[in-house]
Image (tube, rainbow, N blue to C red):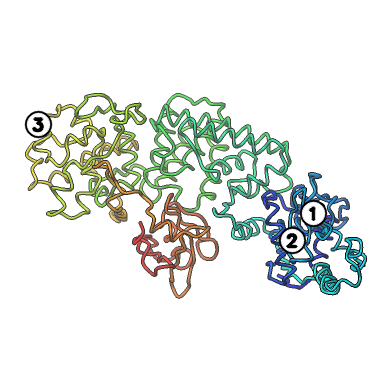
């Protein structure tokens, strides 16, 4: 990396002559006229205006049309402007007004009396002492002639003072600016660097950068992609850009690492074809997930990446599956969800699965896909009741139980109407209810028990209010027996009293384990030895994230947490094995991004990010870590669980 101080006008000339170009990952020009005025005022007064960051590479990097006319194209490999586009373009517009690409000139004037830069109104424009800055920036300006032409006689008492002021404007040409030249042939590394440099409120993801790069080479690309994302939102299956681009990259033949779509070898034709295939594949996949898997909306998925394998397979098969394959693919979807298949090493897993889809068929294909999604578990190892201990509403098992209730057409306990994921009536909105209301159990039993999956059921809002804080041995007397069995409530009425609460949980865990085993294509737990005794306990969520048992539940992300946000997210860090790793936590999505160093990447949970750091630094140890007690909030010094 090189650092030099250079005249700012030299950099402007390089931009105008095409020696400096704008890489396609850059956003469009966004400054307004007051921003341009303020830049010149800072330069006039000698204030710092930041550094320019140039990227020098041997790669054939696609670049976009700059906001200035670059009449001369460099015969040599250009350098790419990563940071400073707004400043250099603004300077060029004033220095060479005819260079403004859209032809709409910026009329910037200098008031020699007040030392102010102004964008004059029509009336102000007739003031001779508002001098055009473009004229003052040229070489060999005769300042006495400028003033004389403005009607200022040589014997005017302000003549010398005003001459010095005009000279000071001209001296902007010689202002020294720091120019950092970054040399790298790693496009992903540079994209990450650019993402960190972004100053606009929300941190740009690599997905945003890839979309921008695609749009620079495909004139209708951004509108086409945005239109499809709106279609996904309208169908309640919105997916983030990262997942969609991973699929697109796989279909383009560049692998799941979607940053490769930026490569110059992927031209406009290839991008259009890959995007058309992506839309087609996702429509196949979403129809499958909704129809075959009873997944009503994307929020029910444990990860948006779960859509990619069905999309690839159905695209490869032209939307057709052979007899029995729909059930096998459904089993894979549920298995990938249950065991958080995409919590780590997403691109590597998708690349391997894409190869399987291309090269294998039938039982061999699905057997290998399911084995991989099962993680460290044996392929046919049944879930045991103990596997549901210390599992809460935030666990993937809970989403699978919700799917099972929808598939089983479970009916509401009071209305006897089948529960609907998206009802028209607000009173029919599904809530999860503590079977034993927490108001009755929290004084006697541990939170790990009364907030566990085994104490949760799906009911409508009006039923939730009807039950209120009554114990099950009271309110269940008025609920039809089949309604209770649809949500796997133990039949034994004696388990519904407060003193039998632990026994109720144990009995219901046994029922729920086999519901999950059924979804996952696993045998019943009864009589099967436990195959994997070391299952990590789930993270206990805060109360307000669990149950809506009143009309005024607290919001998920409160004001105190919002105040901790930076443009990249809430800053967190960990010191592990003497090395500090910095990261950013997004309170809304609960993702953690490690921008550099051990475990670099984006993770769907704090624990996923914690495991990645441990694996990177000490691969020989058990990497299981509770992320909420692993990461520290940098601003407060408290553990991450303090803001969950």
Give the residue displayed 78% in from the left and 70% down from the top: 175
**Along the horizontal axis of the image, is 590 left or right of 21?**
left
Asked if the residues shown at circle 3 and circle 1 are in contact, with their CB atoms under 8 angstroms apart, the answer is: no
First in sequence: mark 2 vs mark 3: 2
**Residue denoted by label 3:** 477
Q: Nearer the viewer, residue 103 or 475?
A: 103
Dividing the picture into quarters, in which one does residue 42 lie? bottom right
Question: At which x and y percent is residue 231?
Answer: 53, 31
> How far across and down, in percent of the image, does residue 131 sit?
83, 60
> Which residue does the numbered mark 2 point to in the structure image?
117
Which residue does the numbered mark 1 point to in the structure image? 93
Looking at marks 1 and 2 on the same chain, the residue that comes earlier in the sequence is marked by 1
How many angstroms separate mark 3 from mark 1 (CA)? 79 Å
Q: Is residue 223 above or below residue 134?
A: above
* Front label number (2 vs 3): 2
Q: Which quarter of the rendered picture does the N terminus lie within?
A: bottom right
Judged from the image, the secondary structure of the residue bearing numbered disc 1 is helix
Secondary structure beneath label 3: helix
In depth, the one of 2 and 381 nearer the eye is 2
- In the image, is residue 179 above or below residue 104? below
| Cα separation between marks 2 and 3 | 80 Å
How crowded pointer 2 is (Cα within 10 Å; few <14, some 14-19, many 20+) is rated as many
Q: Tell me the tag on residue 18.
A: none
Spot occupied by residue 483 in the image (x, y as percentages of width and height): 19, 28
């Amino acid at each position: 990396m090189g650092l030099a101080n250079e005249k700012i006008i030299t950099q402007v000339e390089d931009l105008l002559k095409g020696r400096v170009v704008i890489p396609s990952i850059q956003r469009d020009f966004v400054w307004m006229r007051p921003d341009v005025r303020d830049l010149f005022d800072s330069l006039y007064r000698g204030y710092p205006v930041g550094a320019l960051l140039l990227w020098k590479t041997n790669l054939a990097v696609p670049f976009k049309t700059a906001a200035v006319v670059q009449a001369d194209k460099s015969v040599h490999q250009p350098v790419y402007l990563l940071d400073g586009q707004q400043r250099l373009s603004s300077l060029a517009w004033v220095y060479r007004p005819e260079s403004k690409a859209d032809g709409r000139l910026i009329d910037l004037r200098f008031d020699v009396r007040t030392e102010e830069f102004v964008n004059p109104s029509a009336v102000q424009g007739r003031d001779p002492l508002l001098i055009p800055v473009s004229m003052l920036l040229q070489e060999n300006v005769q300042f006495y002639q400028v003033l004389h032409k403005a009607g200022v006689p040589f014997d005017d008492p302000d003549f010398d003072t005003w001459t010095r002021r005009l000279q000071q404007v001209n001296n902007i040409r010689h202002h020294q600016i720091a120019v950092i030249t970054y040399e790298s042939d790693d496009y992903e590394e540079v994209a990450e660097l650019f993402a960190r440099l972004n100053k606009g409120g929300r941190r740009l993801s690599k997905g945003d950068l890839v979309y921008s790069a695609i749009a620079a080479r495909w004139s209708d690309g951004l509108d086409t992609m945005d239109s499809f994302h709106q279609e996904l939102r309208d169908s309640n299956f919105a997916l983030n850009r990262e997942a969609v681009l991973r699929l697109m990259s796989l279909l383009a033949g560049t692998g799941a690492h979607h940053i490769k779509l930026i490569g110059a070898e992927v031209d406009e034709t290839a991008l259009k074809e890959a995007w058309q295939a992506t839309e087609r594949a996702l429509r196949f996949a979403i129809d499958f997930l909704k129809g075959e898997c009873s997944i009503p909306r994307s929020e029910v998925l444990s990860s948006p990446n779960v859509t990619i394998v069905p999309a690839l397979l159905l695209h490869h098969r032209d939307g057709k599956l052979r007899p029995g394959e729909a059930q096998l693919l459904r089993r894979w979807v549920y298995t990938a969800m249950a065991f958080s298949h995409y919590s780590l090493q997403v691109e590597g897993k998708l690349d391997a699965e894409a190869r399987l889809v291309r090269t294998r068929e039938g039982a061999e294909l699905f057997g290998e896909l399911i084995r991989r999604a099962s993680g460290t578990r044996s392929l046919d190892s049944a879930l045991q009741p103990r596997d549901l201990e210390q599992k809460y509403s935030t666990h993937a098992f809970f989403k699978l139980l919700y799917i099972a209730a929808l598939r089983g057409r479970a009916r509401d306990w009071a209305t006897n109407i089948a529960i609907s994921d998206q009802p028209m009536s607000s009173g029919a909105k599904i809530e999860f209810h503590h079977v034993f209301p927490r108001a009755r159990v929290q004084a006697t039993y541990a939170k790990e028990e009364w907030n566990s999956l085994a104490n949760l059921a799906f009911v409508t809002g009006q039923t939730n209010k009807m039950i209120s804080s009554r114990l099950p041995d009271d309110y269940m007397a008025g609920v039809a027996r089949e309604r209770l069995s649809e949500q796997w409530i133990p039949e034994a009425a004696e388990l519904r009293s407060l003193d039998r609460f632990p026994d109720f949980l144990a009995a219901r865990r046994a029922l729920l384990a086999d519901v999950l085993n059924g979804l996952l294509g696993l045998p019943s737990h009864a009589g099967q030895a436990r195959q994997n005794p070391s299952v990590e306990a789930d993270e206990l969520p805060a109360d307000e994230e669990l149950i809506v048992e009143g009309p005024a539940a607290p919001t998920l992300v409160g004001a105190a947490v919002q105040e901790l946000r930076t443009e990249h997210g809430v800053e967190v860090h960990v010191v592990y094995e003497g090395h500090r790793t910095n990261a950013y936590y997004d309170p809304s999505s609960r993702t953690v991004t490690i921008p550099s160093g051990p475990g670099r990447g984006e993770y769907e949970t704090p624990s996923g990010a914690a495991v990645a750091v441990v694996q990177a630094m000490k691969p020989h140890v058990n990497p299981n870590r509770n992320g909420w007690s692993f990461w520290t909030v940098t601003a407060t010094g408290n553990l991450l669980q303090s803001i969950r």
